[in-house]
Each structure stands twice: as structure tokens, then as C-alpha cells.
Image (cartoon, grey):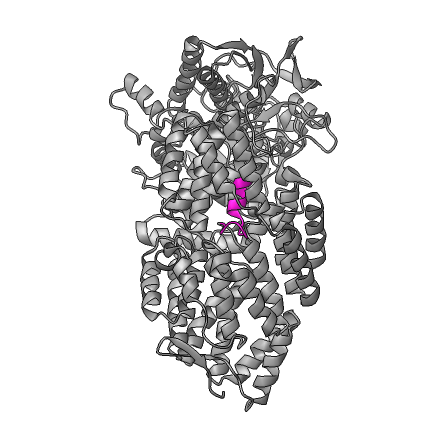
Amino acid sequence: MRRVAVVGAGAAGALTAVQLMRQADRLGRRIGVWLIDPAGPTGPGVAYSTCDPRHLLNVPAGRMSAFPDDPEHFLRWLTDRDPHAAAGDFVPRQVYGRYLTDLVERTAAASPHARLHRVRDEVVAVRGQGFGPVLRLAGGGEVRVDAAVLALGSLAPAQDWAGPELRESGRFVADPWAPGALDGPAGEGDVLLVGTGLTMVDVAATLARPDRVVYAVSRHGLLPQEHLPAAAPPVEAPPDLDGSRGLDVLRRSVRRHLSATRRACGDWRPALDGLRPVTAALWQQLPVADRARFLQEDLRAWEVHRHRMAPASAATLRALLASGGLRIGAGQVVAAVPDDDAVTVDLSDGTRLRVGAVVNCTGARTGPRGTTAPLVRCVLEGGYGRPGPAGLGLDTAGDGRLMPAAGGPVLRLWAVGAARRGNLLETTAVPEIRAQAAEVAGTVLDALTDRRTPAPTDRYGQRLSTSPEAAELYDRALERILAGRAGAEELLGEAVAADPDFAVGHATLALLGHERGSVGQTPAALASARRAATVRADDRERSLVAAVDACLTGTEERGKAALLGHIGAHPRDALAVSAAVPTVSFNGVTAAEEAWALVEGLSGTYGDDWWYLGQLAFVRQEQERWEEAEALACRALAAQPDAGHAVHARAHVYYETGEHRVGLAWLDEWLRRHGDGAAQRSHVAWHAALHELSLDDRPALLRRYREELVACRVGGGRLLVDSASLLWRARMTGSWSGELPVAELLHAAPPDWLEAPATGFAALHGALALAAAGDLDALARLRAHALAHHQAVFALLVAPLCEALSAVVREEWRQAVRRLRPLLPLLARTGASKAQQEVVEETLLHALITGGEYDRAERLLADRLERRASPLDWRRLEAVRGRGARWRGPVVVGGSWERARSA
């Protein structure tokens, strides 16, 4: 029997213990759970131990289930006891406390494999014995376990503001939730509550009476907003929310979201509720300095709108304010002098009060520094943990495991609830805690699996719920995906044939099919993944399937939120990270700074892993940090010469720095040594062709196309991405004479890429290929498909691009220029690299020159040459400066390309 301690028996600890027992039963594993807390009852904790029925939940009953996969569990429990209860009711907190107690007791009594040990004592210290923690109790003795979960709840509020004289008097209530705390001096005369949040709302209701005034003061004097009596459904967060662009940009985006929702729904609350699924991701994307600014400038406003009070509590508060029984002010305590009868308090606004007691309602301490909690101090001082980001809570990995201090000992310690605030920001409400409890329980049980018969894992230690044979096939496929090698889909096909219930195998096939444009196979693979996830999968695998499902069938916003949320919880899921970042393999769901922040934030997770170094190298070249990108790519290639991302990054470095001859020689050598079997061989050849194009070497460009990029040498979407786009680019630069051999490419290309592309990336290259063929009817059909597509990038970019390319085909140069220019800043949203986006700029340049707008063409060419040396651009610049010089570019006549006339 493996032994797990859960330290803390409030809501977070109770839900974690229940999940440990339930999941152990489902897996058939024997486990002992030591639930340790000095409190008498199990479950209520501080939040739900109040006996005052006026203290209500601030979330409706229908959203308070203990289980993320059974959203009506609490409502069923409630209606069994009160048939009149409804999902929208805000029930007393003590009722929810009884629910948690009952849940723990019933689960323990019914469990055939788990045994619950309730220890009513305080854990004051921890030390290691191997990887297993040894917990020292305040009452003496130790509990030795294989793993421990810290469910400590919120830290005690800070008291420094009160001063030693007040704190040591009998007229200061440090913790209003301590048993009997409000029965002493707080029951005499007027009273001052310091803090105006949800704690104040409950305490004011308890202390209010006709013969006294309850004063409440805080720095801002802000009160929590209230819930609507009938809540509207959340409004999905907009796609432009991006923390990596900085706090100021994020503020503006959130305000636009709130305003738009208020106009559409009549209230701002659905907009704020729609931010809940993406809050952690936005917080993690913010630069470090902006997180500190948010805490200083925005946190209080966020909290009063995000953590709202029940309508009945708001009505009580309004009545107290109207009667004068409650008075709210903005200010701080600057002096508090107690005597035998009362406390004289001076506030920062000049007000002087004389009250019977001062009650600390400031809320929980946000950071561990300065805390008197002995276990937290021991964790920090012993190096078993470290403060979380922005000084909030304890630092944890995506699965909740404590991150040790640099060089500190590693123990099997996890955290749930308030301790994870630095990483997640929002982590104290039941909807967040129940998900954490389920995930941490599964992770702990995985970590304690008998290693004599280890569960299969992928190369990054992610558990695979399948047979060893299927797992081995999957891991080989994953390595090929990460290296950019061919054959991954065949291996995955073998894996799911060996185990039809292998959810991750089916999900990966669906993802690859979607990216390759194999629309026909994607729905079947996705359906198999959904079915298999219900048969045999752990929390990570179910989360991955859900994220892939959202990306393939939902809106851009939903897919992005699901995939980034999965990565936040499972950062070592390299497949998910690859799918999120635009690369040579995947279209991605992030762009520019957002993608950079995601990759850079994983450095501690992957270290010197060759695949990760290649990803980071690509980020560095996009940031124009060429030397760093080159060094990272070389480190990756030294470890894995086939590393596709590193090759891709280095190819971009050579191109963007104008090292065309050196880059061309290096790419040719890599193709000679490692090109056979490279899934992206045609793309590497395309990069080599870009150097030849930039060198204005037309014979070499033609030879490259015929040897590497003709239809018989390329497959799938690459026929358009590499071959057709190069033909269009060559035509736009005047580097190709005669007919374009595009018909053979269109005949062999996936039809869906041309008729109904699933991604913006595919649609971009389909449109270019259709323009190269001069097919105006097909461009019109693609435009109609784009306008009807659920992803925003289609309407914003693809549809107007089809119009612009049609104008080029029709030789309507002025209209082409007008339509092309606004599209340049939007191209990154397709996931195309800068070099791929450049083909649209080449089209604009061609339209300017052919349309006789030489001044604008000259400025554009000069800007390009500022970025990168190019004999091709120098030739074109000299031509447009001559004005009368001949420009030999293409025109379209009757759907076929002919040589252009003089400019």
C-alpha cells in the first residue's frame, strides 16, 4: 500500500482526498490517505465552517459540484435534502461545508482499495527520506509517506498595519473566522472592520444591530459587485487577448470585450465570466514587470468584479448602508490606541473613530514571505519549494508539483488551491480547486506506480494508457514529428491498430491529418479519439483529446484557450507545444510575441533537449537575435543532426541576414546528408531556392524546381506551400520565363486545400496557387468558403486576399495595390513564417511596378534592402529608379501567362 498525505482538510484537501480514493479504486490500486489538519470537522475549513445562515456562497449551487466531470453532483445532493432547491440558488456556506464532510465520509466508507486516516494535528515541518516526505506534527511524532499534497488554504492575513499596541490588546480580532472571535469586545459598541471585501460583507451582517455603527475602511473603499439574480451564460473571450503584448494592450482588449458584451447583452458580467478559462494563460503570458504592475494597479478592481457577492448579501448590505448601520470609507489606519473601554483609531483621511474593537478583514496574505506558518517557512528555508511568480504563493510546475529552490532537495510534494496563485492567479474558487484536485490526484498516483511494471511513457515521461507495443510505436512517431521526419502517420496507424482504445494515438492522427489537409481522415480519427478517451485515458490524455477537438472543430478562440490551458497543466506534452507554435510542422494557435512567450517559458521544463533548442532557435531568429539563434540551432543539430526545427531556424538565419551563398551551400550539404527521409525535404529545398532567387540566379532556380519541387517529388499540401508558392514568387519577380507548370501541382494537390481549406495557412497557399493558374472562378469559390468559415482569419485575411489576387490576374493594378497593402500586417495570423509572408509583399511590389507606381516601389525595395542584402532587389531597384527601364514581369491574358510589355 502506497501512503499519501494531504495536509489541510478544508475544501481543497477534502476534494484531493476524495479524488485520491476514487481514482485509486478506478485503477485498482491500494492506497492509504492521511488527511492531516487540526480542525475538528473534515471538509468545511475556514471558508465553509461559519454557522451564520446569512453567510452565503458567492457562486450559484449549480456551479459548485465537487467533480469537474459531474457538474450537477452538488445540486443532486442539495435537492435530496431540499426538493425546492434550484441551480441558481446561493445557499448558506455551512450547507456546502456539510456537503464536503458527507462526501469524504461516503467515499471513504465505500472505497474497496483506499483507506482514510484522519489525523487532527498540525504539520509544522517536513524533511526528506529519499523522495518521500516525512511530516513532523506539532503534537509530536512523524508521518512518513510516499508523497504529500499541500492543501493549506489561504495564509493568515497580514497584521503589521495594526501595530503592536493594538495587536496585543484584547480589542483586536486578528481572524474573524476563529471560533468565538466575534463574541468578545467585537460585540460591544461600534466596531471598525479593516477591509471591504467579501469577508467584510459577512462580518458586517453578523455584527450589525440597531444600537451600533459598523465602520468599514480600505485603501480604495471598493465593495464587491453583486451577481445578477439570473446569471447569463459566459461570453467567450475574444481572440485578441494576449498577455505577451504587455499589460497596457491587455487592458484595452479586456475593456473592449466588456463594452461589446454590455452593448450586446446589457451587462458586463458575462464578459468577465468568459475570461475565466483563459485567465491563467493571460497571467502567464504577461512579462514579469507587468505582473507586478497588475498587482499594484489592477488587482483590487479585478477582485471586486470577479469575486461577487450573492444578491441576498448585496441586499443586506444596501439596507445597512441606507440605515446608517454600515459606513464605508477609503483610507488606511495610521494610528490605533486602545484603552480600557475602546480603541481610538486615526485614519489617513483625517477621520478619528472610537470603537469597541477593530476586526481584521483584509483578506489572506498573498505571498509566503513574512508568514508565521511553520510548514511554509520550513518548505522555503529547506529549499523544498520557492516563492511563486510575482511573490505569490509557492512556485509549482504545470501539474502542481512544488518547484524546489536552486540546488534544493527534490521531494514528492504537490500543492492545490491558494498556494498556486503565483502560477495561476485565480486558484481559490471551487471550480478551479476541483479541477486541480482531480489532476494532482492522478499525477500523484502515476508517480507512485510500481516501477517494477512501469506504465508506458513517451520520451518526455508522459504516461500513455496503452499497451507497450502501441506506446513504443507512438514514441517513435512522436520523435519523427519532433524531428520533422517522414513516416509518423504510418507508425501511428500501426499503434491504433495494435490498440484501438489508444486515445492519444487517434488524437495525434487527427491533428496530423488536419495539418496535412487530409480532411477526409480527420473526423474519423477525432471520433475514435473521443470514444477511446472515455474507455481508457488519464486526465492528461483526456485533456489532450479535448484540446485537439477544440482546435479542429471549434472557433480559433476556443481552440487556442483549450490548447494553451492543456500546456499550462502539462508543459512536458511536447506534441501539444508543437501544435501550439507555428513551425514547419504545424500551423499553430499562437503568433509572434505570444508564441515566443510560450516557448521561452518552457526553458526550465525542457532544458537542453534538442527538439526544444530547435524551437527556441526559431523564436530567436524571429526576434532577429541571429547569433543566439545560430548557436542554439548548432547545439540542437550536434545532438540530433536530423532536427528539423533547428535546420529550419538556421535556414531562416542565413536568409534573413543575407548570407545567401553560405546558406545555400549549407542547405545543399544538409540535403545531401540528411534529406532522404525528411518529411519537410521540399521545404528545405524551398529555402535553398529562396537563396537562388535572391542571388538572381535564374538557371539555378529553374534547376532546383525541376530536381526537387516538381509534382512527382513533393506530396500533400507541400505541393502548394513549397512548389506552387515558389512558382508564383518567381513570376512576381520576373525570374521565370514562359508558362508556369502549375497545372500538374493543382492536379496532385489535396483538393480540400484549394476548395475548402481547414486552416488559414492552407488557404493562403491555395489562393496563391489558384492565382498562379489564373483561375478566377476558383478564387471566387475560395473567397465564399472563407466568408462562411468559423475561424476569424478567413474573413479578415483569406477573403480579401482572394479579391486582391483576382485583381492581379485581371491586371487591375491600382485595385490590387489598394487591397494588398492592408493585408501585410495580418499575414502572421495564418502561422506563415516571415519568409512565407513575403510572397504577398512580392505580389504588391509587382503590382506597384507593373502599374507604374515607381516611387512607392522604390521605397518598398529600399526598405527590403535595409533588412537584407539581395542582388535581385538591387536589380529591381535600379530598374525602377530608371523609370524608363524595361521591367519584364508577367501579365495575365485569357487565363494564361505571357511576357509583359515595357513598363
Identity of the residue drawn at 36% across and 69% down: 775
- The percent position of residue 280, horizontal first and vertical second, equals 51, 40
Establish if 266 lies above or below 535: below
Q: Is residue 447 visible?
A: yes
Q: Point out the residue furthest to the bottom here.
A: 884
- The percent position of residue 11, horizontal first and vertical second, equals 48, 22
Q: Point out the residue furthest to the right here.
A: 407
Figure label count: 0
Q: Nearer the viewer, residue 858 or 200?
A: 858
Which residues make up the magenta segment? 574-588
**In the picture provided, is 387 more to the left or to the right than 584?**
right
Establish if 782 lies above or below 251: below
Identity of the residue drawn at 48% across and 19% down: 14
Q: Is residue 829 visible?
A: no
Residue 104 sits inside the magenta stretch:
no
Q: Point out the residue furthest to the left here.
A: 84
Q: Nearer the viewer, residue 483 or 899?
A: 899
**In the picture provided, is 93 more to the left or to the right than 696?**
left
